Amino acid sequence: MIARWIDDKLRRMFYHVGRAVAFLPAPFILLPLVASGLLGYFGIRKLAISDDLEYLFTPENNQAILDRDALEVVEFFPTDNVAWGSTARVIIQAADGGDVLFRDDVFAEVLRFHNVLRTSNTTSRSFDDLCIRAGDGSCVVSNVLQLMIDTGSGTNLTKMNLTFPYYNPNGLNYSLGLYLGNELGGLELGTDGRTVLSSRALQFVYILTESWNSWTDTFLQVCSEFESENITVNYNTYRSLNDELLDLPTRVIPYLAAAVGLLVLFSVFSCMMLDWVLTKPWLALMGVLSAILAIVSSFGLVLLTGEQFSTLVAVVPFLLIGVGVDDMFVMIAAWRKCDVRLPVQERMGRAMSDAAASITITSITDCVAFAVGVISVFPSVRIFCKYAAIGVAFDYLYQITFFAAIMSLAGRRERANRHCFTCCPVLPKSQARDKSAAYRLCCASGVSREDNPNDPVVNKDPLLTTFLYKYLAPLIVKTPSKAVLFILYAGYLGVAIWGCLQVDIGLRFQNLAADDSYVVAFHDPEEAYFKEYGPKIDIVMTEPLEYWRVDVQQAVLDKLKAFDQSQYFYDTSETAEVWLRDYLLFLNQTGNSDAATNKTAFMQILVDQFLPQFGRQYQVNSIKFSDFYTNITASRFFVIPDDVKTKEREKDMMIEARRIAEKGPVKMVAFATEFIFAEQVVSILPSTLQTVGIAAAAMFVVSFLFIPHCVATIFVTFALVSIDVGLVGYMALWGVQLDIVSMTSIIICIGFSVDFSAHITYAYVSAQATAPADKLAEAFRAVGMPILQSSLSTILGMVVLAFFPAYLFKAFFKTIFLVMAFGAAHGLVILPALLTILPDCGPKPNETKIADEKNQTKKFSNGHLSNNLSTHSLSPSKMANKSLQMNNVKRTSSLPNLNPKLGTDNPYFTPEMRTWIKWVKDQKPTGIDNPVMTGDTMEVSEL
C-alpha cells in the first residue's frame, strides 16, 4: 500500500504544481534560462579536459602503481622501456609486405629514414644532440638498428646469421647477448628455431635525455612527411594517445549539432497532428531546448565543483537530449488525454498529475543508476556518472518548470482556438462549414465548447496509439500469441547467453583514438607482430637479503623453476638474465665455490671480478649496494612472457607472475609498466557485476515504492536483468568488448531499461479496467506511443555517433541502440504478456475505483474545481459508462432548471450551461461528469 500512498501524494502535489505553473508561467520560464546562463558561463571558465590515461582508465588502489612506487624507492626503473619508457617508436614494414631486413633496397630505405629522423631539427636541437650516449660517444639506439648501421646492407647482415630472440655473436659467457624479441616481428626462422631467415616488421625505439616535447614535434613531422615506395612507417610517441584522446571532444561537436537537429525534426514531426490548433510543433522545439538547458546547467555546476572533463563525458549530451525528449513525450501524452475543453489551469493540473509518476520514476531510476556508477573504482566511469546523474536531475527539474510553463502557454493558445503558426483565432471545423475550401483546409481547426464530447474528433487519439490499443493489445493476450512470444524470447535469451560467453575483456589502446589516427595505424601492427615475446617482467627483491646463504639462493632458484613450469613464460635458462644464477655458475667455474656461502668472499669477488669483467650488464640495472659495498640492498632479474596477444592472457600472465613472486620464503615484486593497464582487465568484470547488482537492487526498491503491485515489481526487475543479459551478449557479437566504455553503457542500460518497464507496468496496474485485455488496452493508450517515441528519439540522438570515426563513440551507439531496442520490445511485448497473468496483490479494482471516486469527487466551490479530482473523472470516453452510476447523485438547488427549452432566451445561461443542459437531457445523468460546468453553476454532494 505504500506505493499507492506515494502515488496519491505525487498526483496531488503535481496537480498543484501544474495549476501554479499555468497560473503564473513567467517565473518558471525565466528562472531556468537565467540559471543555465549563469552556470554555463562560470562553469565553462573552469573547464579542464583530463588526458591522464593512467588516472582515468585504471582502477583505484592499482597494485601495479604500488609496485612501481616500491621499485622507485630502491631506485629501480622498468627494465623494458620500449612501450612506456621511450620517447618515440616506429614500426617499419616493406611496402609489398615481404622481408624488411635482408633485402638491400628495403634495407637502404630503412637507413635513409633513420638518417633523416636523427638529423632533422624543427627546434634548436636534433636527435643526435639529445640522445643517450654510449661509452664510445655514439647515440644509443635499438639493437637491430645498430646492427644495420654497422653492417651497411642487407647482404652483409645476412652473413651474420642473426638468431632470435637473443643474438650473441661473440659467444660471451654469463650473457645471453642482444635481445631482439621486441625489435623483430613476423619472423621466418630456420630449422633450428633460432636463425632468422626473414622479418616482416622492425621496431625502433628512440630515447632522449631531455626536451622530449620539442623533439617529439620534430619526430611527428618527419614521420608524417616521409615518403618511400619501398617501406611504410607507423609511428607513436609517449604523448600520442593523450593528444588523440584530447582531440575527440572537439571533433564530436559537429555530431552533437547534427543530433540536436535530428531530434528537433523528429520531435516536431511526432507532435504534429492534422489539426492546426491541436498540433504542437513549437512545443516540441521547446522540449528540445529544455534538454539543452539541462545539459548547460549540469555541466556548469559539475565544472564549478572542480571536477575534470574526460573524453567519455562528451557522450553525456547525446544521452541527456534523449532523456529530455522522452519526458516531453510523456507530458504531451498526458496533456492530450485531458479534455480539450477544460480550463487551462485545470487541464495543466490534471496532465501534470497524470505524468507525475511516470517521469518521476524514470528520472529517479536514471539518477540512482548513475549514482551507483559514482562508486566505481574507475575514475573515468565516476566522472561520467557524476555528469549524467546531475544532468538527469536538471532535466527533471526543467521539465516540470520550464517545459510545463511553455506547455501551459500552448494550452492557452488551444483554449483560444488559435492557429499554431499565426496564433490568430480560427473557427472550429464544426462551425466552418460555410467557409471556403482553402479556409477549411488551412485554418479551420480545434474543438468548439459546444461540440459533442462523444464526437471522435474531440480528444482524437494518434494513429499509432490507436493501433497499439486496438490491435496489438488484443493480439498479445491470446494464448497462441503468448506461445509464439515464448519461443521467440527463448531464442533471444539463448543467443544472448551464448554471446556472453564470447565477451572479450579489456580496453585496447587504439580504441581510445580516432580510426583515422596514426596511433591506430601503429598499434595494429604492434599487436600483430610484437606480442609473441611480451615485455620483460622485473622480479624485484626490494628488501636487503643475505644472498650468500644457501636458503636464499635456493629460494631464488625455486622461483626460476616455477617460472619455467608456467605456461605464461619462456624457459628462463634461454630468455632470462639472472645475476645470482650466473654469479654462482661463475664461482663454480673459477674454483671459488666456497665463496658462495661466505659473505666476505661473496661480496669481494662479486664487486671486484664478476661485475666489472663478466657481468657488466648487471652492474647498474640489477644490483643495488649499500655504502662501501658491504651489503646488497635490492636486486632483480627479469623473465619473458610467452604470447600475450590478448588482454585476457596478459592479465592471466600478470596474476601468475605475482603469484610466483609472492610465494615462498623470499618475497618478491613482479612488475612491468604494462601491468598498470592490465589491472583494468582484472577489475572490469567484478566492478561491472558489483555495479549492476547494486543498481538492480536499487531499481527493485524504487519500483516497489512507486508501482502499486508487488508481483509487478518483480516483473520489472526481471525485465532489467533480461535486457542487461541481452545487452552484454549481443554487444559481444557486435564487436564491442567489455571495457570501460561498455561498462559505462551497462550502467546507462540499467536506468533506461527500467524506464520502459516502469511505464507500462505502472500504467497497467493503475488501469481502471478489470479484464486483462482491457487493462492492457488502457495501458497502451496511455504510454504505448511515448515508449516508442522515447526509444526512437534516444536512438536518433545517438545515431550520428555511428558515423563518428572512433570506437569510443561507436561502442556507445551500439550499446544504446541495443538497450532501446530491447527495452521497447520488453515494454511493449514481453512485459505485457507477463502482466496479463498478474495475480491481484492489492485492493480489488472495484474497491479501488470506489475509493478513488469518493476521494476525488469533491464539492465545486468558489468557482474552482476541487484539487482532488481524478485525472480521468471527466474523460469524455467514460461519460456514458458513468451515467448509470451517477443517477443516485443528489442534485442541490444550485443546479439550473432543466425544464426550459434550449431556445429560451435566458440571460443567465452561458454557452457552457446550454451545452451541459443538452447533454444532461440526452444522457440522463447529473452534471458531475460534464467538463464544461464550473462551480458557479453546480454543486455536487459527496458520494
Image: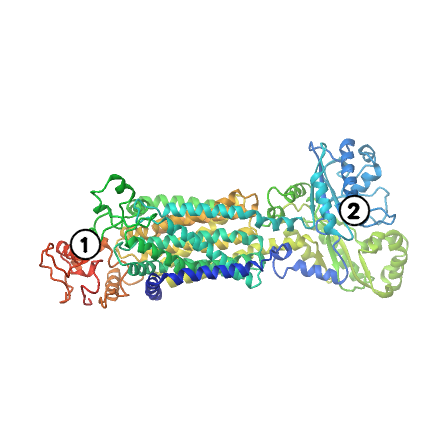
Q: Is residue 785 above or below residue 846?
A: above
Where is mark 2, residue-wise?
A: 127
Where is mark 1, residue-wise?
A: 880
> Camera-side residue: 357 or 667?
357
The mark closer to the camera, 2 or 1, is: 2
Residue name at image x 61 percent, y 49 percent: 247
Residue 427 image point, x, y percent? 25, 48
Residue name at image x 56 percent, y 45 percent: 807
Q: Earlier in the sequence, mark 2 or mark 1?
A: 2
Report helix, strand or loop for mark 2. Answer: helix
Q: Is residue 262 above or below residue 636?
A: above
Residue type indicated by callout 1: Ala
| Residue 876 found in image quarter | bottom left
Residue type indicated by callout 2: Phe
Colouring chosen for the image of the structure? rainbow
Q: Is residue 718 left or right of residue 313?
A: left
Report helix, strand or loop for mark 1. Answer: helix
Residue 751 image point, x, y percent? 45, 56
Residue 102 image point, x, y percent? 78, 33
How many neighbours does mark 2 have within 10 angstroms: few (below 14), some (14-19), or many (20 or more)? Answer: many
Q: Is residue 162 left or right of residue 654?
A: right
Residue name at image x 83 percent, y 48 percent: 175
> Camera-side residue: 548 or 212?
212
How many neighbours does mark 1 have within 10 angstroms: few (below 14), some (14-19), or many (20 or more)? Answer: some
